[in-house]
Amino acid sequence: MKTLIIDNGSKWITQLCELIVDEKVIIGMKDISSVDTESFDLIVLSGSRNGPSVLTNDLLGEEFDLVKKSQIPIIGVCYGAEVIVYSYGGLLERMDGDHRGVTTLHLIEGKDVKVYEAHHFRIKKLPEDFIVLGRTEHAIEFFKHVHKPIYGLQFHPEAFVDSTEGKEILMGIISDIMKK
């Protein structure tokens, strides 16, 4: 599997890349037009370290277009999940302060798992054609498109992999994508 990782300025980009074991290409958000995105099997949108919010970042135009037009499976991590929500017309909301640390993710299938969150925006409303797969006490943290292979993880599956189950969730999504 060949994966395109779009680095939105994540402080955990190395850890994210370590989880993607197959062939990968890493580019910045400004470099999307320089790559044939349709030559990849998966696109991963990383988190971002204290950059401008998705609501005000002028550099995200190409990334928004990619999310809307791509036929390739997409996984958005934290900021990347916010990019997906915003590009499809969902609503984001600034939270009171930053939310950082290991928290409990209540999966819709009834299971509770530990994940690491680090964000100051939350998903207030998912766009049409998206469904919730999991939430914490703060907000929606895990979702997917009902027809397209697009997933959002507002938490960080690449962080604190020894004490959380985020990695297993990410690997499960990738495994499902590879089967199709």
Image (spheres, rainbow, N blue to C red):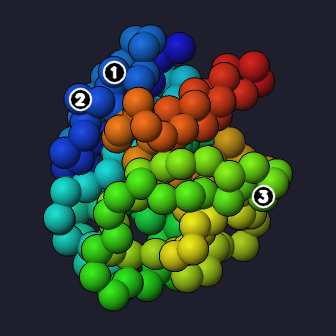
Q: Which mark is residue 133?
A: none
169 shown above or below 19: below
Residue depicted at x 50% and y 33%: 167
Circle 2 sits on which residue?
Answer: 14
Q: Nearer the viewer, mark 3 or mark 2?
A: 3
Q: Say which of 173 and 166 sits in front.
A: 166
Question: Is residue 165 among what the camera can see?
Answer: yes
Residue 122 percent location from the top left of the image = 46, 75
Question: Is residue 36 among what the camera can see?
Answer: no
The outermost residue toward the right is 109
How far apart are labels 3 and 2 at the CA level? 30 Å
How far apart are labels 1 and 2 at the CA level? 6 Å
**Quarter of the rendering occupied by the C terminus:** top right
Circle 1 sits on which residue?
Answer: 18
Circle 3 sits on which residue?
Answer: 108
How far apart are labels 1 and 3 at the CA level? 28 Å
Q: Say which of 84 and 131 sits in front.
A: 131
Q: Amino acid at mark 2?
A: Thr
Residue 7 percent location from the top left of the image = 26, 42
Earlier in the chain: of badge 1 and badge 3, it is: 1
The secondary element bearing badge 2 is classed as helix
User: Which class describes the residues within 10 Å of circle 3: few (<14), some (14-19), or many (20+)?
Assistant: few
Q: Amino acid at mark 1?
A: Glu
Residue depicted at x 32% and y 51%: 47
